[in-house]
Image: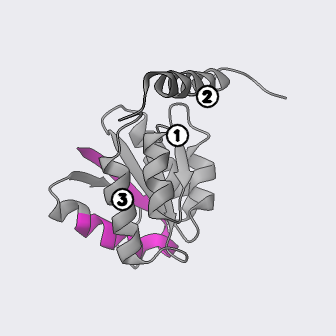
Amino acid sequence: MKIVIASDFSGFNLKQAVKKFLLDNKHELVDVGQVDSENKVLYFDAAISLATAMQTGEYARGIVICGTGAGVSMIVNKFKGIYCVACESVFTAQKTALINNANVLAMGEKVVSYDMGCEMVKEWLSAQWCEGFEEQRRKNNERGFEVLRGLEQKNFK
């Protein structure tokens, strides 16, 4: 699976742990965020880089990390076709892919340990949208996702 990843300076160490986990598990990975501990990338710049890369269609999933996961998720969710949830548990990470069809996972280094972050990524990547659902639940989830996609087209005031 081809994955894009980014972090700001406050999520750099968690991103490095997740990158190692992904590479050890043979995922194709491109880093568009902070690449070293020297030059600080701010959360909104990392999020914009990731969302822009996701919109090319080249990546199946994206992972974005800051201190809390909140700031980066707010930014990437402003981009059409990006469905991101900031997660702090393995259960939530898995369910966002299974139920909500989230294509971007956001995490915060100040709230998620390195081991927990890697486990969250593992479960999130292994979950397939609506997998194992009975027909009516699958149809409901598909309808819900179409509602979400339709909201992207509206100009709310």
In the image: residue 34, left or right of residue 109: left
Q: Are marks 3 and 1 in contact (CB under 8 Å)?
A: no
Which residue matches tag 2? 148
Helix, strand or loop under label 3: helix
Q: Which mark sits nearer the N-terminus, 3 or 1? A: 1
The picture quadrant where one finds residue 80 is: top right
Does the magenta stretch mainly form a helix, a strand or a loop? Answer: helix
Per the image, label 1 sits on a secondary structure element best described as loop
* Whether label 3 touches label 2, CB < 8 Å: no
Query: SS class of the residue under badge 2?
Result: helix
Residue receiving disc 1: 83
* Residue 75 shows in the view: yes
Amino acid type of disc 2? Leu
Range covered by the magenta-colored residues: 1-21
The amino acid at mark 1 is: Tyr
Between discs 2 and 1, the one toward the N terminus: 1
Residue for badge 3: 121
Q: Nearer the viewer, residue 14 or 50?
A: 14
Identify the residue shown where x is 30% and y is 48%. Answer: 126
Q: Distance between the Cα atoms at labels 3 and 1?
A: 16 Å
Nearer the camera: disc 3 or disc 1: 3
Instruction: Name which quarter of the figure residue 19 lies in.
Output: bottom left
The answer to which quarter of the image holds residue 32 is bottom left
Image coords of residue 37 (percent x, y):
39, 78
